[in-house]
Amino acid sequence: MAQAINAALRDAMTADDAVVVFGEDVGPLGGVFRVTDGLARDFGEHRCFDTPLAESGIVGTAVGMAMNGMKPIIEMQFDAFAFPAFEQIVSHVAKMGNRTHGRTRLPLVIRIPSAGGIGGVEHHCDSSEAYYAHTPGLTVVAPATNADAYGLLRAAVDHPDPVVFLEPKKLYFGRSEVDTGVPVPPIGRAVVRRPGRDATLIAYGASVPVALAAAAQAATEGRDLGVVDLRSIVPFDDETVCAEVARTGRAVVVAEAPGFASVASEVAARVTERCFHRLEAPVRRVTGFDVPYPPPALERLHLPGVDRVLDAVDTLQWPSGAR
């Protein structure tokens, strides 16, 4: 996935001289995850450059550049490193278009290496999507495949308003071929990664492979689970999600972030409101626990895994004798 994102950045910079990339160590080093590897060498350090360790300044600079015709793509080195920039993001990035009645829009992308699974500690593995999803004015996407990482980032760069682009760190080094000439569904559209008859697993970003693994395991036990990959948290694709849940009558939302007041909570609420009369059981959530991100030795207990997902599926009020 890191190479797919690198290709998207490279192609966007080639296509439009207004696109610039900056952040901490993204220049000659190529970023801590090497996502920007080679961009400073090939496009020059006026197009891809390092900044001081000052996230608020990075976002503030991007705001000014976007107001003056540039298309900044900025990197927050780790999830929680973005929190010092939160005031800039919620007070200016998200509101500028509305504040100016659409006269000044901010075509910028905030890339955030997101979630856990790499044996990191707090500030390096947080799942911060709920903060951004709760802020009107921000588009929030979370790819789970290499093809989506490329396609959604190209769409984010072309978007006229700010996009928070959440990159699952543990998927950075997953390998699969990407045909950059094949279009992917646009921002705002979910996809059915696996059709199923008995229940629907709903996931995004790093939790999609977990949901798919759970569905594969369930199939060996006689239960047919579908998987919906949200891809885009804001805007939310009610149509695709509700069509799948209405068909199966059962749903489990899978996400790494703590469950209280989370994106998973919002998904469960929306599905319940829209599919209530088609549900055979309450919508369940399998999430991270409501604690600060744990140390590496305890990470495997905190993150949703196949067993926890299947345990939740087992509670979906199945008819007596059904698997």
Image (spheres, rainbow, N blue to C red):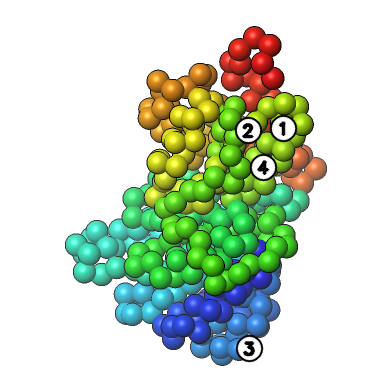
Image check: 298 left or right of 319? right
Q: Please tell me which residue is depicted at 41% across the width and 33% down the height of the picture.
A: 270
Using the image as rendered, state which of residue 213 and residue 254 is in the foreground: 213
Direction left: furthest residue: 101
- The quarter of the picture where the N terminus appears is bottom right
x, y percent for residue 247? 49, 30
Q: Which residue is mark 2?
A: 225
| Mark 3 and mark 4 residues within 8 Å of each other at the beta carbon | no
| Mark 4 and mark 1 residues within 8 Å of each other at the beta carbon | no
Where is residue 168, by image quadrant? bottom right
| Mark 2 and mark 4 residues within 8 Å of each other at the beta carbon | no
| Mark 1 and mark 2 residues within 8 Å of each other at the beta carbon | yes
Q: Which residue is mark 3?
A: 41
Which amino acid, mark 2? Leu
Using the image as rendered, state which of residue 18 and residue 180 is in the foreground: 180
Describe the element under mark 1 as helix, strand or loop.
helix
User: For the residue carrying disc 3, how many other residues have a C-alpha within 10 Å: few (<14), some (14-19), or many (20+)?
Assistant: few
- The quarter of the picture where the C terminus appears is top right
Q: CA distance from mark 2 to mark 4?
A: 9 Å
User: For the residue carrying disc 1, how many other residues have a C-alpha within 10 Å: few (<14), some (14-19), or many (20+)?
Assistant: few
